[in-house]
Image: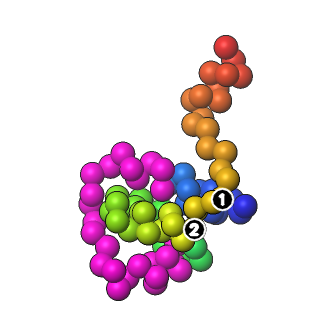
Amino acid sequence: MSNHLRNIRALFENAKEFKVSRKVDTYEYESLEKMILDDNIRYSEVIELFTDKVYRDWFYERNFKDKKFNITRYSEQWLIKYY
């Protein structure tokens, strides 16, 4: 898996903790998906898009479902390594 896709997944996971800051219209879904996957959009905007749960779920189904990710928060890795 590419580093970019791992970054997108990390943004995806972190966006769950934020309040909705932008609702994505359904007609924008595929064009925004292409921009995200082609790295033609700033990460701050990606986080904003992923605060919309409906869009986030749609994006997950198309890009992350059935793919294995090893997501460990930095602090957890640090604790395991040093304690």
Q: Are marks 2 and 1 in contact (CB under 8 Å)?
A: yes
Residue receiving disc 2: 63
Furthest residue to the front? Answer: 66
Q: Which quarter of the image is occupied by the N terminus?
A: bottom right
Q: Main secondary structure of the magenta part?
A: helix
Residue at 33%, 80% in the rendered image: 26
Range drawn in magenta: 12-36
Furthest residue to the top? Answer: 83
Residue at 27%, 69% in the rendered image: 23
Q: Is residue 48 visible?
A: no
Q: Nearer the viewer, residue 68 or 17?
A: 68
Q: Is residue 42 above or below residue 16?
A: below
Is residue 40 toward the left or the right of residue 82 in the image? left
Amino acid type of the residue that numbered disc 1 sits on in the rendered structure: Lys
Q: Nearer the viewer, residue 2 or 57?
A: 57
Residue receiving disc 1: 67
Where is residue 69 drawn, in percent x and y?
65, 50
Q: Which quarter of the image is occupied by the C terminus?
A: top right
Q: Secondary structure at mark 2?
A: helix
State the mark number for residue 8. none
Would residue 15 be counted in the magenta stretch?
A: yes
Where is residue 79 drawn, in percent x and y?
62, 21
Q: Nearer the viewer, residue 64 or 7?
A: 64
Where is residue 10 drawn, in percent x and y?
54, 51
Would residue 25 be counted in the magenta stretch?
A: yes
Q: Is residue 2 above or below residue 17?
A: below
Callout 2 crowding tier (Cα within 10 Å): few <14, some 14–19, many ≥20? some
Callout 1 crowding tier (Cα within 10 Å): few <14, some 14–19, many ≥20? few
